[in-house]
Image: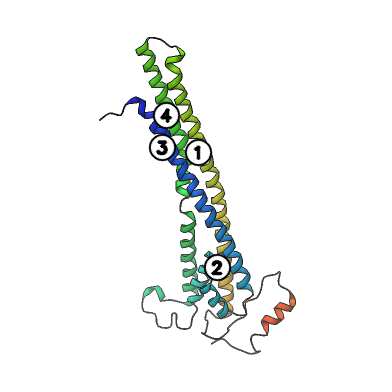
Amino acid sequence: MSIPNELIVPATLWTLVAFSVATWSLILIKLVQHIRLVRDNRRFSEAFWHAPHLQAAAELSEKSQGPAARLSAAGLQVLRDDAVDEAADLEHTGERQDLLERALRQQIHKERRKLESGLAVLASIGSTSPFVGLFGTVWGIMHALTDISKAGSASLEVVAGPIGEALVATGIGIAVAVPAVLAYNVFLRRLKITNADLDELAANLISLARKSRFRIARGKPVVAVQPDRHATASRAVADTSVLPVGTQPA
């Protein structure tokens, strides 16, 4: 069953309209996702570095939301006293440091896959929309030439409609592609920044875990979590007072 020539260009236009709807829907979804991500990560980071010890940081991670909190929870869970003492499978077999690094790496991959969702669609729409519009343009011109041959005249009345419709298809194709490409570049940049922040948090968790010998005793503070460089000296003194002098990890 052949498709009538006069339906090809309208079908192309409706395809571009569908691409546009998909593009703006993804832009809104990804925009809300990244706004929440930035807010949750900022709140968790401030609370994490003000936690008095790793035990409190682990409990905070389990109650918080966002990629940074999930990464921290996945890593600190490995350091529990009963996390690997009785390994029942290969997943929990090995040194605690290796298990910690693997847990952090796996969680980073999970968060990255969540943030990458939808970007392939934006990239595909941005790269194919101009060609879809160009297809409508070419087909419209072919239809116009056919009408000219049938009418035996190249008057404006014969060619204006098909050629005008064809040029509109090209314009719409470009108009659909530009927002998709811009949005893809913006969200790709945000993805790289988030990945860098998660990598930095993972490195900090490994450094803090090394001080506690990669072990967290339930209900016991093991090692004080030092605030970042912007913390005041008085805050540092208050944090170190959590652990009595000479206290050893469990």
Q: Decide: is 156 above or below 48.
A: above
Which quadrant of the structure image shows residue 93? bottom left
Question: Where residue 131 sits in the image (x, y, percent)?
Answer: 44, 33
Q: Distance between the residues labelled 2 and 1?
A: 37 Å
Question: Would you place residue 73 above or below residue 29 in this image?
Answer: below
Residue kind at label 2, given as amino acid type: Ala
Amino acid at dot 4: Gly
How far apart marks 4 and 1 lie (CA) works out to 15 Å
Q: Residue furthest front?
A: 157
Query: At 45% from the left edge and 25% from the top edge, which residue is drawn?
Result: 165
Q: Mark 3 or mark 2: name the one nearer the start of the chain.
A: 3
Q: In the image, is 4 to the left or to the right of 47?
A: left
What residue is at 49 percent from the left and 59 percent from the top? 112
| Number of marks drawn | 4
Q: Nearer the viewer, mark 2 or mark 1?
A: 1
Spot the residue most to the left. Answer: 1
Q: Earlier in the sequence, mark 3 or mark 4?
A: 3
Disc number for residue 202: 2
Position of 224 relative to 14 (above/below): below
Point out the tag, 4 or 1, that comes first from the N-terminus.
Answer: 4
User: Is there CB contact under 8 Å for labels 2 and 1?
Assistant: no
- Which residue bears the numbered disc 1? 177
Q: Residues within 10 Å of mark 1 (few under 14, many from 20)?
A: many
Which is more N-terminal, label 1 or label 2?
A: 1
Label 3, secondary structure: give it.
helix
Residue that label 4 marks: 136
Label at residue 29: none
Residue 22's x, y, as percent? 45, 45
Q: Name the residue under label 3.
A: 15
Q: In this orientation, which residue lies closer to the viewer: 8 or 114?
A: 8
Structural distance between the alpha carbons of marks 3 and 1: 13 Å
